[in-house]
Image: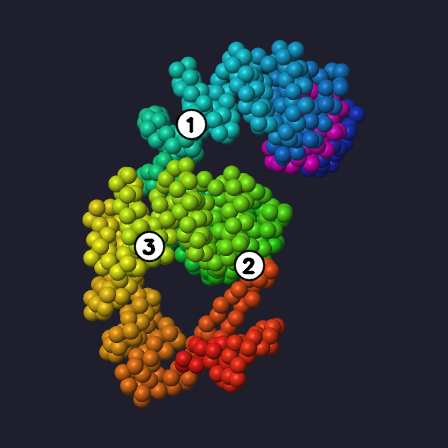
Amino acid sequence: MILSARTSGRIRRLCTSSISSPQQSLEQCVRGTHVPDHVGLVEMKSELTKLMKSGNLRGARKVFDKMPHRDVYSWTTMISGYVSAMNSDEALILYSTMRVGPDISVDAFVLSVALKACGLSFNVAYGESLHGYSEKSGLVNSVFVGSAILDMYKRIGTIDKSCRVFSEMPVKNVVTWTAIITGLVHAGFYRDGLMYFSKMWRSKVSCDTYTFAIALKACADSGLLKYGKEIHTHVVIRGFDATLCVANSLGTMYIKCGEMQQGLYFFESMNNRDVVSWTSAISAYVQMGQEEKAVDAFLRMRNSGVSPNEFTFASVISACADLSRLVLGEQFHTDVLRLGLEDSLSVANSMMKMYSSCGKLDSASLLFQGMRCRDIISWSTIIGGYCQAGFGEEAFAYFSLMRREGPQPTDFALASVLSVSGTMATLENGMQFHALALNLGLDQRATIRSALMNMYSKCGNITEALKIFEEAESDDIVSLTAMINGYAEHGYGKEAIDLFEKSIAFGFRPDSVAFISVLTACNHSGQLDLGFHYFNLMSEKYNLTPTKDHYGCMIDLLCRAGRLSEAEELIQDMPCQKDDVVWSMLLRACMAKGDVERGKRATEKILKLDPNSATAHVTLAHIYSSRGKWKEAADMWKKMKSKGVMKEPGWSSIKIKDQVSAFVSGDRFHLQSEDIHGILELVAPGAETHELDRLLFPMIFDN
């Protein structure tokens, strides 16, 4: 420092006689003929360091290139600048140029920087040559060089070489230990990383915040909550729990190990939060099904001035998907575009899920088409979106495209197309997907087995569904539920109930979906008392809260039994939201029993929820007609007409030679309409056109 001050004074004195302004550049001073070289070099090195610290890499390079003599410090400073700027190629070119020079001796510092450049650019050959040079020169024994070699091999994915280098190092410090633990954890060897952490602890090397943070990450990713709590204790003892990176790792560890509330407590009690803190909290809320709190946390983060990253947006947009909040999701989409994060796979996949969940499949498809690269989640999301919306042909088209251009289908994508095959009752497609599942070795996955059983059941082949169930290598609650549901849908109520009872006897704990299946079986077989037994068993024995679907099964069961008063009372007592579906069940039962007053009450409830419900108007009109109340029935038809309410026509479809033909009541626009009517003339010779239309499209004339 004294030498620099004196040198600076000499430079100023030497320059004042020929330079009028003290603000003239360093270059003009150095150009003077009376300045000794070593004085100019010191000043230029100082300027080089200052420019590098300010991030002015281009200016630093200009000074570096004009230096008459460059020592190893100058080379190291310039190479480090390029490494910090992620320009590893230029850093290695500079290092090679330095090596060619005759007067420069490579030291441990510049070699460690060059090794870091090799790791960042995945330049394996150059890195291995530098490793060889370090061993030949003896620099490998430097803790800086050894740590750099270890880090280089870690970055290029050869963690076994990192471990070998680590074991051969004569001196190990906290940086070295942390590097090897980090390499193992990032490579997925969590338990090995924790084993090295234990060795470090026993070797009496003091851990720093980064060591504790990576050890907690290993506990989080391996689910070792007990070990994580032990590390937590040591963190508190050393006072590191308030450090941001450690606090984030602690919260994440508890969340990933299932202790959601404890993890969220950490995040909510932190005085300072960064984007990692907020993103972890938002993700935790989404995982817990508390999407409203996730959105609230995101808005609080924005108000605190912290800028979200791609992972934050992926989580909060996923919350919007679960909540079906389209407007808010579109606002987040705008933010994503403004910040230039639209090319992030996780963000794009979440946005597709959001648009699909909100019924905007066109927007989801546009996003998919515009993606520069797609992963299996992208394909599964777009296929699943079309399947859930019932657009089977579009889902099949995307699945075929994935087979041609995308990755190998996963069990989720395959289960989606199997499900829609069952919904459309296209057995041929379902069988082709079954063959594909066998070919890919996915047929024994629980999701595929249950999807296959559902598909065959819905396509009318309960025998094949039972065969898949009996040939399963292991039983699970998902497959059992699928088989119970298959039996129930085909009217085999006794078999469904027997299988449910056997599954309980074998120790399976039924979930809410299993109870829906067995209640459906009771419904189809008319076993009202047994249905109530299972309904009460949910809360009394298994601590399951009945949902709207369970109440729907019981209401339908009461309606089928003709106990309309009890059905209406159960609807009124439902703790969950009463939608038009449950009231429609009661209304249909009222039509069957001719219960006018109860039918009027049910219709009023439906029309409050959906004022333009054609079903409610038509059904009540039929109830009036069945009781001879022609004036009231006519009033209902007039009311429908004045509102512009139209009963949705019935339709059916048939697939012949890979071509699906849909037939809608009253539709005469089919390409083969004349041929169809010609065949009907043969079937019903002499029938009038009006009568043929009644035969073809009875639903119109029923009204």
Lower position in the chain sequence, tag 2 or tag 1: 1
Q: Along the line of sight, which residue is nearer the eye, 233 or 257? A: 257
Type of amino acid at the residue the image marks with label 3: Tyr
Type of amino acid at the residue the image marks with label 2: Glu
* Residue 8 in view: no
Cα–Cα span, label 2 and label 1: 49 Å
Cα–Cα span, label 3 and label 2: 31 Å
Asked which secondary structure carries label 1, the reply is: helix
Residue at mark 3: 492
Residues rendered magenta in the picture: 53-78
Residue at mark 1: 215
- Report the side of 674 relative to 31 (left or right): left
Tell me if residue 498 comes above or below residue 192 in the rendering. below
Quarter of the rendering occupied by the C terminus: bottom left
In front: mark 1 or mark 3? 3
Where residue 199 sits in the image (x, y, percent)?
Answer: 42, 17
* Residue 205 in view: yes
In front: mark 2 or mark 1? 2
Quarter of the rendering occupied by the N terminus: top right
